[in-house]
Amino acid sequence: MRLKKDDICLVTGASSGIGLACAKLLKERGLMVYGPSRAVPAETVEEKNGIYMIGMDVTDEQSVTRAIALIINREGRIDLVVNNAGAGVSGPVEETPFDDAVYQMDVCFFGCLRVIKEVFAHMRENGGGRIINIGSVAASVSIPFQTMYSAAKASVRSLSAGLRIEAAPFGIQVCVVEPGDTKTGFTALRKKIALAENSPYAQKYARSVSRMEKDEQNGAPPEKVANAICRAAFSKKMKQRITVGFSYKLIDVLYRLLPAGITEKIVAKLYG
């Protein structure tokens, strides 16, 4: 199934950053775009710059169910889903509270899963559809003190790979798009775990987070990632996985080719 003008699209996390840039671009390509937001009341639609904002929280199963039902009742179908909603938690594994680890997985992985489970039957009954999950280069390169985020994005990669096989007989295509460092509000919103008094991680944690923030704020604009998502959405057949940016594609290849011991030393030198 290839997308056409006036097809129905859902982009989670569309209120800012990559999600907003993606929603705008898909709208320009002629799609009818719905963008969930926790700021919009439940079962409500608010048009903003041609994008239909609806109330939805990806961490709340009932909220997801209501939002998907609202779109189906209005439009009769959903042709494309871009699972972009995300959040970041940084901190050493030993000192990260379990609730924060659960929150990280809940937004990035289970939030994605909740949306997929709600839309899948509708796509299957409609004869097909497209699902694009936004992962991260961090799925390959597990970064110290951002380990929970890397684990969540690695889960999204695995989910996408398995789902792609399961979905193929029904005409549903699945792709994971993995950006590298991107300049968005994500950096400022990252939750930084407060360390214990006299924590042995204090100096390395500070250096690692500082390096992450610097790289992100010097990263690609969200529009570059949105362009990659849009190309995938309108392609004849979506690839299984797309890494955004030549340098990150190179890193991905090298990470798979080099011995694990060498790659870990490189990462430790950069972020340790």
Image (cartoon, rainbow, N blue to C red):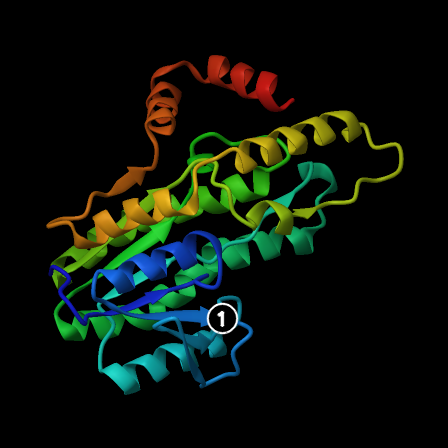
Regarding residue 82, the answer to whether it shows in the image is no
Q: Element under label 1?
A: strand
Q: In the image, is residue 179 above or below residue 214?
A: below
Q: In the image, is residue 212 above or below residue 3?
A: above
Residue 250 shown left or right of residue 174 in the figure:
right
* Front residue (pair 22, 190): 22
Q: Which image quarter is the C terminus in?
A: top right
- The residue located at (54%, 36%) in the rendering is 216
Q: How far from the left and from the top, in percent, is residue 218? A: 52, 33
Q: How far from the left and from the top, in percent, is residue 125? A: 17, 75
- The residue located at (15%, 66%) in the rendering is 128
Residue 257 shown left or right of residue 140 in the figure:
left
- The residue located at (16%, 56%) in the rendering is 168
* Front residue (pair 143, 102): 143
Which of the 4 image quarters holds residue 234?
Answer: bottom left
Amino acid type for the residue under numbered disc 1: Ser
- The residue located at (50%, 83%) in the rendering is 42
Residue 181 shown left or right of residue 5 in the figure:
right
Q: How far from the left and from the top, in percent, is residue 140? A: 42, 32
View extreme (right): residue: 197
Q: How many marks?
A: 1
Residue beneath disc 1: 37
Q: In the image, is residue 165 above or below residue 53?
A: above
